[in-house]
Amino acid sequence: MEVQSIKSVSEMIQLSITPVFMIAGVSGFLAVFTGRLARIVDRLEKIDEYLQKNKKCDKLIMKQKDTLVKRIKNINLSILLMTSTGLFVAFVMISMFLSISFNFSDFTFITLLFMSSIICLILSLLMFAREIVYAVTSANGSGDFLHG
């Protein structure tokens, strides 16, 4: 192996450290998101059991159920977007190594992949923030989050 190619691989490994940390952060977010999803599903199952046993349609219970369904949709979208973030970052890493291995430089492609990962990250966190608003609103028992 040539000295120049060893140096190039070494530099590429150094450059790939940042995406590795980003993937670690993504995995942390996914753990939090899936934990919240599990708790929401558990609460929804308890409400369904209550409704089956009591056979009456309490408006407050139905409102809670509707809120839980909204929360599930938001957290599912957040999980999908965060997973996409991780995939885009992984593609960035693969593209970086392929560009060194096969002597091509597609800066634009790698930049677009990284920008896509950041956009997915932002959207995922926005959906997560929306889920938190639903959670706090339902915990307060009011429909108005800002005025509690």
Image (cartoon, rainbow, N blue to C red):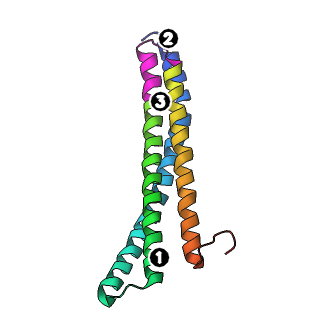
Which dot, 3 or 2, sits closer to the camera? 3
Precedes in sequence: disc 3 or disc 1: 1
The answer to whether residue 10 shows anywhere in this view is no
Residue 11: image x %, image y %? 55, 22
Between 138 and 3, which is closer to the camera in this rendering? 138
Marks 2 and 1 sit apart, C-alpha to C-alpha, by 67 Å
Name the residue type under label 2: Val
Q: Which residue is drawn at 33% across and 90% down?
A: 54
Name the residue type under label 1: Lys
Q: Name the residue under label 3.
A: 92
Precedes in sequence: disc 2 or disc 1: 2
Q: Name the residue under label 1.
A: 63
Q: Residue at x 49, y 42 (%)?
A: 23
Name the residue type under label 3: Val
Which dot, 3 or 1, sits closer to the camera? 1
Residue 27: image x %, image y %? 47, 50
